[in-house]
Amino acid sequence: MDVLWAPWRMQYIVQCRDEGDGECFICAAVRADKDRDNLLLRRTRHSCVILNKFPYNNGHLLIAPLQHKAELHDLSDEETLDIMHTLQAMVELLRTTLSPHGFNIGLNLGRVAGAGLPGHLHWHVVPRWQGDTNFMPVVADTKVISQSLLALYDLLSGADPTEK
Ligand SMILES: [Zn+2]
């Protein structure tokens, strides 16, 4: 089995954004009124969805509680359910728009486990295609992906059946 999942890379990647002015980028995106600029795809009552600016693969999403919470046991029942529903909805959204063959869904708890932003829980949803491990290390380092992020954002927000 080929493994694309590389949490050590995420640590480096998210840390770069985390250490700028020390502000949590998820909280900053939630507070701001620039969802498209911040690639904030969806807000629910208790959670949000953000496109990863440094994706492992096309369609790599981050799902987080709106509140800045670091531990699973900090989440209320309502938040837990909301996040799980958001995960389900995002898998379906990616399935209908990008037709992946599978998904990696994961949560890194603590820096030792690869969490680049340990203060704010966030689940990674990474669509997978047959053979994607062959080209992704190359593609991920090009600027093409960051330019296509807004196009992907528009595709996903336009295709969202629950979008108001
Ligand atoms: Zn936060």
Image (tube, helix red, strand yellow):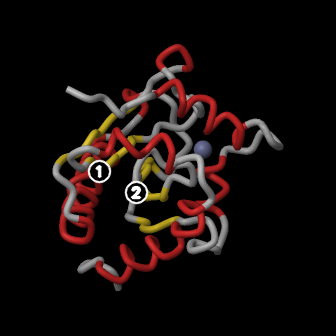
Is the CB atom of the residue marked by disc 1 within 8 angstroms of ligand 1's nearest atom? no
Q: In the displayed structure, does residue 59 sit left or right of residue 161?
A: right
Residue drawn 19% across the image and 63% down it: 99
Compared with residue 72, is residue 39 higher up or lower down, i.e. above or below? below
Image quarter in which the C terminus is found? bottom left
2 or 1: tag closer to the N-terminus: 2
Q: Which mark is residue 58?
A: 2
Q: Residue at x 21, y 56 (%)?
A: 100
User: What is the three-letter code of the residue carrying label 2?
Assistant: Asn
* Mark 2 burial class by Cα count in 10 Å: few <14, some 14-19, many 20+: many
Q: Which mark is residue 60?
A: none
The CA distance from mark 2 to mark 1 is 7 Å
Foreground residue, 123 or 11?
Answer: 11
Rendering quarter of residue 93:
bottom left
Give left or right: position of 100 versus 67.
Answer: left
Q: Position of residue 25 (x, y in %)?
A: 65, 49
Question: Where in the figure is residue 112, as x and y percent of width and height?
Answer: 53, 14
Neighbour tally class for label 1: few under 14, some 14-19, many 20 plus, Cα within 10 Å: many
- Residue lying at the far right of the rendered structure: 21
Disc 2 CB within 8 Å of nearest ligand 1 atom: no
> Which residue is drawn at the image coordinates 53% and 34% (left, top)?
10
For the point 51% across and 52% down, the residue is 52
Ligand 1, by image quadrant, is top right
Disc 1 element: strand
Judged left or right of residue 20, residue 82 is left
Amino acid on which the number 1 mark rests in the picture: Pro
Asked if marks 2 and 1 touch (Cβ < 8 Å), the reply is: yes
Viewer-proximal residue among 127 and 66: 127
State the image quarter where residue 11 is shown. Answer: top right
- Secondary element under disc 2, as helix, strand or loop, is loop
| Quadrant of the rendering where the N terminus is positioned | top left
- Return the residue at label 1: 127
